[in-house]
Image: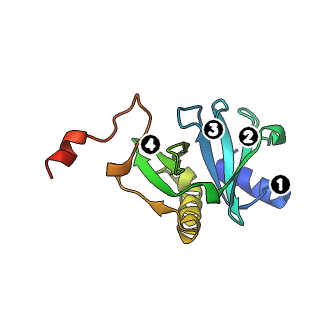
């Protein structure tokens, strides 16, 4: 079953908590907000809350006991990092902690998720959560970050 069919089935059954559904992957990281294990989720947005509904790995059915939600008022800015086949959204809080959301892009199967994520990001910007550039990017300590020597030469 493809992703569009999974979303259509969940929509028709009234199982989605929010609007603008997108397939995302959450991984445990050093951001300090998400502490669960690696898992597939459907991310949706409604009334200032991001909902993450956990999907089982093989059968793509919802696992409500593992659902998450985050109020957008806790975040101040976001950054999007582009990799080969994935993009990563970092949602930052004032205290430096962040939520890291992975999603695939660039294929026919991922177009709907990409479009809905773009719509969600517009909603976040309307709430005052602004996109930051790479110079403010913190990221994981084991990944490439900001080059401090570059800032000194300006």
Asked whether the beta carbons under mark 1 and mark 2 sit within 8 Å of each other, the answer is no
Q: Within 10 Å of the Cα at label 3, are there few (<14), some (14-19), or many (20+) other Cα atoms?
A: some
Asked whether the beta carbons under mark 2 and mark 4 sit within 8 Å of each other, the answer is no
Labels 2 and 4: the sequence-earlier one: 2
Question: Looking at the image, which residue sits at the far bottom?
Answer: 126
Labels 1 and 2: the sequence-earlier one: 1
Question: Looking at the image, which residue sits at the far front?
Answer: 95
Q: Which residue is disc 1 drawn over? A: 15
Q: Which mark is residue 85?
A: 4
Labels 3 and 2: the sequence-earlier one: 3
Q: Which residue is disc 2 drawn over? A: 55
Q: Within 10 Å of the Cα at label 2, are there few (<14), some (14-19), or many (20+) other Cα atoms?
A: some
Image side of residue 130 versus residue 71, left or right: left
**Separation of residues labelled 2 and 4 (CA atoms):** 21 Å
- Closer to us: mark 4 or mark 3? 3
Question: In the structure shown, which secondary structural element does the residue marked by tag 1 occupy?
Answer: loop
**Separation of residues labelled 3 and 2 (CA atoms):** 16 Å
The location of residue 40, given as percent across then percent down, is 66, 39
Q: How is the image coloured?
A: rainbow
Asked whether the beta carbons under mark 3 and mark 2 sit within 8 Å of each other, the answer is no
Q: Which mark is residue 154?
A: none
Asked whether the beta carbons under mark 4 and mark 3 sit within 8 Å of each other, the answer is no
The location of residue 3, given as percent across then percent down, is 66, 49
Labels 4 and 3: the sequence-earlier one: 3
Question: In the structure shown, which secondary structural element does the residue marked by tag 4 occupy?
Answer: loop
Q: Which residue is disc 3 drawn over? A: 34
Question: In the structure shown, which secondary structural element does the residue marked by tag 2 occupy?
Answer: strand
């Amino acid at each position: 079953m493809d992703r569009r069919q999974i979303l259509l089935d969940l929509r028709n059954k009234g199982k989605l908590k929010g609007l603008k559904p997108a397939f995302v992957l959450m991984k445990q990281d050093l951001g300090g907000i998400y502490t669960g294990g690696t898992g597939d989720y459907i991310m949706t947005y409604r009334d200032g809350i991001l909902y993450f509904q956990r999907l089982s790995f093989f059968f793509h059915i919802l696992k409500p006991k593992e659902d998450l939600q985050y109020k957008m008022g806790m975040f101040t800015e976001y950054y999007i990092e582009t990799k080969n086949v994935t993009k990563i959204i970092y949602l930052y809080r004032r205290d430096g902690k962040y939520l890291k959301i992975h999603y695939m892009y660039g294929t026919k199967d991922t177009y709907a998720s990409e479009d809905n994520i773009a719509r969600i990001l517009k909603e976040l910007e309307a709430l005052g959560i602004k996109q930051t550039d790479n110079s403010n990017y913190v990221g994981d300590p084991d990944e490439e970050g900001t080059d401090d020597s570059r800032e000194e030469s300006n």
